[in-house]
Each structure stands twice: as C-alpha cells, then as structure tokens.
Image (cartoon, rainbow, N blue to C red):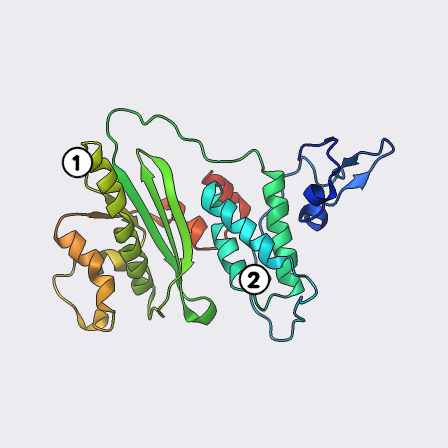
Amino acid sequence: MEEGSSDTNPNRINRIDGEAVPRAESKDGKQHLPPGNHGRRCSLPAGSRSYSKEEEAEPASANPRYQGVVGGLLFIARMTRPEISVHVNLLGRRTKDHTTQHWKTALQVLQYLHSTRTDGLRLRKPEGTELASHIYADASYGGEGARSQTGVMITLGNQLVGWYSRRQDVVALSIPEAGYIAGCEGAKDASWPVQFLEELGIVSQPNLHTDSEGAYNLSKQPKVARRSRHIENRFHYLRQQVRAEKLTIRTIPGKNNPVDTLTKLLPMSSVNGWK
C-alpha cells in the first residue's frame, strides 16, 4: 500500500498490517501511514530471545492470526526475500505455543517488509557464455534443542535461483560436523542445476562453497576416521560426490559467505551488505 492511497478496505489495510504498521485517519477521511513508520527502513529482530520459548511466558491464545501471518511470511521468504528465511523458520516453530512476544516479532518482520517493499531479486544476463552453478552451504552450530541451522544458496550464472534455511534433524557434535551436514544438503541440491544445464546442452560441474575447513577436510578423507565414525552414512553423500569428481568443493572466508544470512540472526549492516 503506497502512502496516501485511497483504498480504505479494512480487510486489506488492518487485517495484518493494523498492528505492524498502524494507520491514522486524516481530515479528508483517508487512511495514511503515521510519519514515524513510512519512508524509514525498519530492522529485522536480531535477538534470539525474540524467537525462543520461555516457559514462564503467557501463550497468546487470544490471537488466532499468528499461523496465518507466519504462513504469509513463509511464502514471501521462499519467493523473493531470502533475508527473512531464518526469521520465518524460527517463528514457524512456535505455531502451536507462540507467546505475545512471538506475535510482536512476527509483526516486526512484517514492518520490515513494508519499509523495504521495493527490494527484491534482480536477474541479469550473465556476463560471457559461462553458466556454471555454485552452491553455498553453511551451518550455525547448536541452537534450540542442540540442533544446528542449515542454510543453502544456489546460483546459476551468478544469479540467485534457490535458497532455504532449516533446522538439522540430527544433533551435530562439533562445528565441523554441522558444516559437513550442511555441505551434504548442498551437494544434494547441486543435482538439479546440473540436470537443467544438461538439457540445455551445457556440461558444467557444480561448485560447493563452504567456510568450514573441518567440513572440507571431512569431504576429502579417503575413509571414515575415528572422529567421524558416528556420522550417519547418508551424510557421506558429499564425500562420495567429491570422490567421484561430480562436485568440486572449495573453502571461502566466512565474511565472503552470503549464506550466513540464512543461518544466523545478523545485524542489519551485515544483511544489507549482501543485498
């Protein structure tokens, strides 16, 4: 909704935005955004406390709109706004036991989207003739239930075409193991860009980028070592792909890994740096 719009349909204006971006009615009978909210880029919630489950917090049972709001945010995160993926993933865990704080956090994400509604994905023609696929994978160690958060980004010709942020379904016992599990997820996602390019008559080997030296070393080991003996066999898919030379794995500095925005609650300065 643009500032000064004459659309006064309460279902469109107030059903979700009513609390996130409150509106005031002027003398001409039209609804406008208050001066303090419109035109100012709001920030995403950065503290993990905003998403955690507090045993003493009172459930927001009187607010049945939480699931609908989070569902809408999930759609937006999957379509055009990857920077809110980790926030929506954390909020989605509270659909059955959310509190008033979770509701306020969801509204803050909505307010951020409203203040940055002109942002989005821009697809440009790749420079040159090379159309290679690059996958960026990372994980934040630990977290709720001791399970780490995996983030994956997929690019074709340096254009972002896929991404997700999700909690790992097993408990990693170390930072390298969490990165190795994330790398396995990225290796599995590397198959569809290869198949797509093959249909276009382009032969290209995907590149997997990680900032975890431990994950890189685990993928290069010729056999299972004592420290990695407990890792489930399915996660060694990454090692098999590297050994078969169907995938190239590379290490990059953590500050150059854009997928950090999908695994951690970063300050807005870092989030904006990847846009």
Image quadrant in which you'd find residue 118: top right
The residue closer to the viewer here, 270 or 94, is 94
- Residue furthest to the right: 27
What is the x, y in percent for residue 45?
Answer: 58, 53
Sequence-earlier tag: 2 or 1: 2
Q: Position of residue 193 (x, y in %)?
A: 27, 41
**Left or right placement of residue 114 versus residue 241 in this view:** right
| Residue at x 38% of width, y 38% of height | 160
Side of 46 where 252 appears, left or right: left
Rendered-image quadrant of the N terminus: top right
Instruction: Tell me which amino acid carries mark 2.
Output: Tyr
Under circle 2, the secondary element is loop
Comparing 30 with 52, the one in front is 30
Residue 163 makes an appearance in the image: yes
Q: Position of residue 99 (x, y in %)?
A: 64, 66
Judge from the rendering whether residue 98 lies leftward or rightward of residue 252; answer left or right. right
Q: CA distance from mark 2 to mark 1?
A: 44 Å
Q: Kindly identify which residue carries mark 1.
A: 203
User: Are dots 2 and 1 in contact, CB under 8 Å?
Assistant: no
Query: In the displayed structure, would residue 65 be above or below residue 6?
Result: below
| Residue at (30, 56) in percent of width and height | 185
Label 2: how many Cα within 10 Å (few below 14, some 14–19, many 20+):
many
Vertical order, 269 against 213 (above or below): above
User: Which residue carries the number 2 mark?
Assistant: 51
Q: How many marks on residues?
A: 2
